[in-house]
Amino acid sequence: MSPISNLSVLDAIAKADGIEVKRQEALLKTGALQTAILTSENFSIIATDEKGIIQLFNVGAERMLGYMAAEVVNKINPSDIHDPQEVMARAQALSVELATTITPGFEALAFKASRGIEDIYELTYICKDGSRFPAIVSITALRDDFGTVIGYLLIGTDNSVRKQVEVALKEAMAVAEKANLAKSDFLSSMSHELRTPLSAILGFAQLIESGTPQPTPSQKRSVDQILQAGWYLLELINEILDLALIESGRLSLSLEPVSLAEVMLECETLVESQAAKRGIRVTFPQFSLPCFVKADRTRLKQVLINLLSNAIKYNTSGGTVVLKCVNVSPQRIRICVEDTGEGLNPAKIAQLFQPFNRLGQEANTEQGTGIGLVMTKRLIELMGGAIGVESIVGQGSVFWIEMDLTEERELHPVLTSLAPALQSQVPTDPRAHTLLYVEDNPANLMLVEDLIARRSDIRLLSARDGISGIAMAKASQPDIILMDINLPGISGIKAVQILCADPLTAHIPVVALSANAIPRDIEKGMEAGFFRYLTKPIRINEFMDTLDLALKFSKTKSPRPSVPEKTA
């Protein structure tokens, strides 16, 4: 053989030796890995034969369960170290799922694995000393080269720490929920306590302002200051309480189809006097076809009024405000409020939705809290909408909201028949109507007495608690009942439920007049059966309009509307 041939053979031998060395190294590495897995104390490895009898019980299983391998191998199956009630529950669940009977025991644990589906589940391991701990276990079927199941592999990890974290989290959530409920109750109580004295201040100030004889110019200036400060304080109370409710997650919304035409008509009525005082012309869209959005009616109106009020307040003298509606898609509509004010630069736009930030308007004569736009943004988002702004310095701004459109819904027939009453007052009836006022606060009673004294068509009866109010309602059959919520004995909520359930009084419209003004309180009152829900402090025009509407309804002697409108 030539030297070259000898070298070729030697090279081939060397290469073969190198491959064999690498193979041996790989086997050693694989063996080391297998040994590390089987001797690991961090998780249990249990292998069984096809009948479920344990054949392998690693160091981790020994540490976790307290058994030595010799005590369990070829002697028991995994069902014996599991909580029997959990094994029974698994068997029952599988029986229902597969419409067949599954025998409790290892068969129930390994059923899915035997069909080629790895099963991972939570269970409780029972140790040799009787102690227990939660575990997460995966079960895999082991098969030979022909696909026949020859056993099962169970890999388990201790789940105690995770369970402890879950328990701690649930406890923390329960504490947080309790704190939220306490906060909500506190807000409701605080709202009532703040509004009650404001009701007297604003109510009597309005009486002086519109009384006879007319106040002197000096008195008029003083009354104007009282009213201006009082209404501003009320606005501040409302906005802070609303913001606190949203932040605590306790603000409830009633999302339903809402007619944009109706809401905008109400908004137009509410802002027209503000616009007229400032010489601002406000233009609203005309709807040729019905247009309904998915929203909370009261909150949508609050959002639109806030945007319109800002557009009027921060406009130029003699400016304009234009409200437009544009379909951005078949399912979405954009409502734009366009003004001719000074406009906003990018830096101010970036700060728009920060609480208590008035963008440098603190020195302005215009009153504000810096909360309105924050509330508007969060309310719109809670209703599934969006808000944005476009502005050019020196030309004006466009604030827009987008809402989801929804199918048209017809108004309740009783509400439809009463709708004209919203547009005009009821003519004075020569026959005196009877109003029963159930109220325990002397100042509130005195205010309503002074208001009713201006109505020659209404005579006033009063009761100081819910029980006597119900008795007087049955005896005198008044045309209207005006009722406080926080009454001695039984609450106004309970009283109106009793009145609604009694055939003698079920037809009488009961109007709530309460300082409980949080939306949850209003919704609770409306669900109880109130015809309308007015909040203190009293707005005289709103109060009189509600009386007229209730009187018109009382003439029908019909059952109350099942979905009465909220007045907040």
Image (cartoon, grey):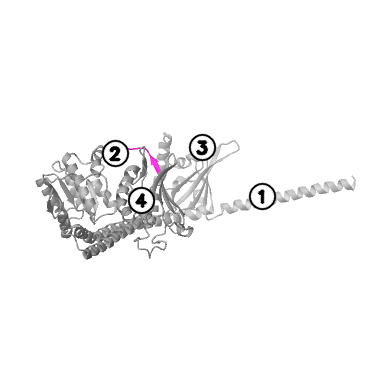
Q: Which residue bears the numbered disc 2?
A: 411
User: Which segment did they paint magenta?
Assistant: 404-410
- The residue mark sitting in front, 3 or 4, is 4
Q: CA distance from mark 3 to mark 4?
A: 76 Å
Q: Which residue bears the numbered disc 3?
A: 115
Q: Nearer the viewer, residue 46 or 117?
A: 117
Whether residue 344 appears in this view of the structure is yes
Q: Amino acid at mark 3?
A: Arg
Depicted 529 relative to depicted 441: above or below: above
Q: Position of residue 73 (x, y in %)?
A: 51, 47
Q: Nearer the viewer, residue 318 or 398?
A: 318
Q: Amino acid at mark 1?
A: Leu
Q: Residues within 10 Å of mark 4 (few under 14, many from 20)?
A: some
Q: Residue furthest right?
A: 2
Task: Identify the residue at horizontal 75%, vertical 50% (top origin).
Answer: 18
Q: CA distance from mark 2 to mark 4?
A: 31 Å
- The residue mark sitting in front, 3 or 1, is 3
- The residue mark sitting in front, 1 or 2, is 2
Q: Residues within 10 Å of mark 1 (few under 14, many from 20)?
A: few
Q: Which residue bears the numbered disc 1?
A: 27
Which tag, 3 or 1, sits closer to the chain's start? 1
Q: Which residue bears the numbered disc 4?
A: 281
